[in-house]
Image (tube, rainbow, N blue to C red):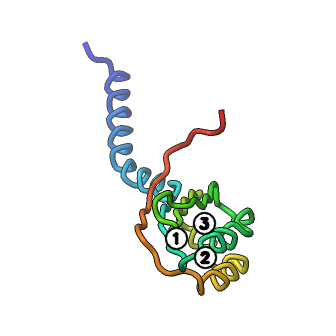
Amino acid sequence: MTHSSDIERRALLAGGLALAAVAAPSLAHAEEDKAMYGLIGQMKAAPGKRDDLVAILSESTDAMPGCLSYIVAKDAADADALWITEVWTDKDSHVASLKLPSVQAAIAKARPIIAGFGHRFETVPVGGVGPG
């Protein structure tokens, strides 16, 4: 025998599940919009200018809102290449950083010794391992 309260509970549960199914795509999109943003890119310095480029890129990177990590590394196989690995709270923070006066000044200073760019990868960081 089915009681009216059982039917009401089932209707409520079914309605809740239907609402969840409709809301899930928009919730997933909201989470995706809030996902961390990462970039890994290779930059080529003019011959013999890699250390100068490292110095420029390493200046004033501590004052970029939303930047969780900014690492400049020398390529082990190419004496003129660098790899820059960035992790941001979100893509908007990265875009906003490009408009900062300190970043604009670094770009202007580095431009004459940048010979080109190699690979560039956008990533979605999911976590990390800190110093242990």
> Which is closer to the viewer, label 3 or label 2?
2
User: With 19 as the anchor, is 96 left or right in this view?
Assistant: right
Q: Say if mark 1 contacts mark 2, CB within 8 Å.
A: yes
SS class, disc 2: loop
Which is more N-terminal, label 2 or label 3?
A: 2
Query: In front: 54, or 5?
Result: 54
Task: Name the image quarter holding residue 3.
Answer: top left
Secondary structure of the residue carrying numbered label 3: helix
Residue type marked 1: Asp
Q: Which residue is mark 2?
A: 49
Residue 6 percent location from the top left of the image:
34, 21
Rounded to the nearest angstrom, the CA distance separating label 3 from label 1 is 29 Å
**Which amino acid is tagged 2?**
Lys
Work out whether mark 3 precedes mark 1 in sequence or the reverse, and give the earlier one: 1
Residue 27 on image: x %, y %: 44, 51
Q: Depth check: 117 or 89 in front? A: 117
Which residue carries the number 1 mark? 80
Q: How many marks?
A: 3
How far apart marks 1 and 2 lie (CA) works out to 7 Å
* Residue 53 rendering spot, x and y as whole percentages: 63, 73
Quadrant in which residue 50 is drawn: bottom right
Task: Say which mark, if any, is on residue 98.
Answer: none
Q: Which residue is mark 3?
A: 93
- Quadrant showing the C terminus: top right
Q: Going 66% across and 37% down the picture, which residue do you hit? A: 131
Neighbours of disc 2 within 10 Å: few (<14), some (14-19), many (20+): some
Which of the two labelled residues, at mark 1 and mark 2, occupies the earlier sequence position? 2
**Given contact means CB atoms under 8 Å apart, are the residues at marks 3 and 1 in contact?**
no
Q: Position of residue 102 (x, y in %)?
A: 72, 77
